[in-house]
Image: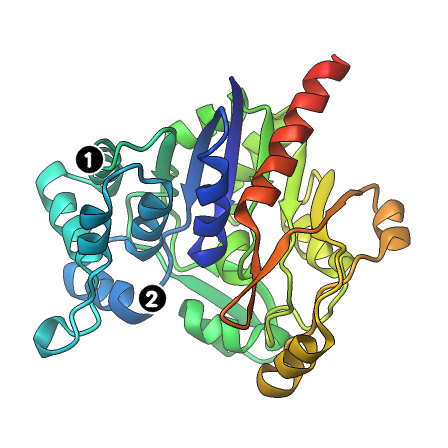
Amino acid sequence: MHKVVVFGGGTGLSWLLSGLKLFPIDVTTVIAVSDNGSSTGALKEELNIPAVGDVGKVLLSMANADDDLLDLLRYRFSQGSLENHPIRNILLAALIDLKGNLTEATRYMSRLLQIKGTVLPLTEERVDLVGLAKGRRKKSFFGEEEISQNVRHIDRLKYDHEFKINQEILEKIAEADLLIFSPGSLYTSIIPHLLSGDVRAAIAWSDAPIMYVCNLVTQPGETDDPRVSSHVEVINRYLKSRTVDYVVANDSQIDPEIRARYLEQEGKEIVTIDEERLRAMETEVIPGDIFRIEDGLIRHNALKTAYMIFSFLMDREGDR
């Protein structure tokens, strides 16, 4: 069975995994735990634990449990001191206390939800992102929320302190047949993995190709340039010793009215393939009709995209 390691966070990662779980692939998911917003941020601050929100989302996306249990874990309190906290976050916080760390808490939840594959937090420690301002400004932007709003003013990212990486992640990278960066916020969901020298070194030593599943639309403040190559350039900058080998990107036309609404109401543009520039970067494009419209919103088609990834793995196997 092909071994794949997926890096990411947030909704984009959860969406991709909901498709990959349908194929005979051994998936290891690595999740950044530096989020500091909403319920996650509150629990992180009050209990001094890593961010559990993205871990919970990923567990639900990979689950093979009954709908009643999934509905329970998705339930979010609407009032009182627990307002805005989903059950899954509270459960993970309790399991950290019972099991000793987030990795073991995640293993228990994986068994409970009958998950195939492995889910690994980047570290067991509470960590936060710090953005260092450009030029002579000494200002720093602390936490994912501030960074996301000020990317254009930031020269580089770092963590607030040195920390130990989960060693199992490095082992999984060494064994992988494919390394994937999921769709999502580049600077706050993808790049946090590459701020670790240990992770970068493991990727550098790996023989596995690197694939990026590109976003469908820009994210104002984080990715204003609507070209696929601009997204790849950001990842390459932080990879340092390697570059993205393949990028899966949408090449199908999206309804002009929906495009116009996204631009007018949210300032978001549709990401477009600029093949010539990508070719110069030695990144091969894997184009496809990988979007769907859900309630008027542009979303990735999880099944189609996962099938493209599975087909890529099978084609590589056939070429050997």
Q: Count neighbours of disc 2 (C-alpha within 10 A) and say few if under 14, some if 14 to 19, many if 20 or more.
A: many
Report the front residue among 70 and 87.
70
- The figure's colour scheme reads rainbow
Q: Against 36, is 232 above or below?
A: above
Query: Comparing marks 2 and 1, which lies closer to the viewer?
Result: 1
At x 8% / y 41%, what residue is drawn?
98
At x 39% / y 49%, what residue is drawn?
162
Q: Against 315, is 49 above or below?
A: below
| Corner quadrant of residue 291 | bottom right
The percent coordinates of residue 133 (x first, y second) are: 57, 74
At x 8% / y 78%, what residue is drawn?
80
The percent coordinates of residue 239 (x first, y second) are: 64, 45
Instruction: Please say whether residue 281 is visible from this viewpoint.
Output: yes
* Residue that numbered label 1 is attached to: 112
Report the front residue among 24 and 101.
24
Please state which amino acid type lies under the numbered disc 1: Leu
* Residue that numbered label 2 is attached to: 36
Q: How far apart are the two marked residues, 2 and 1, measured between alpha carbons? A: 27 Å
Q: Against 72, is 113 above or below?
A: above
Report the front residue among 215 and 198.
215
Secondary-structure class at tag 2: loop
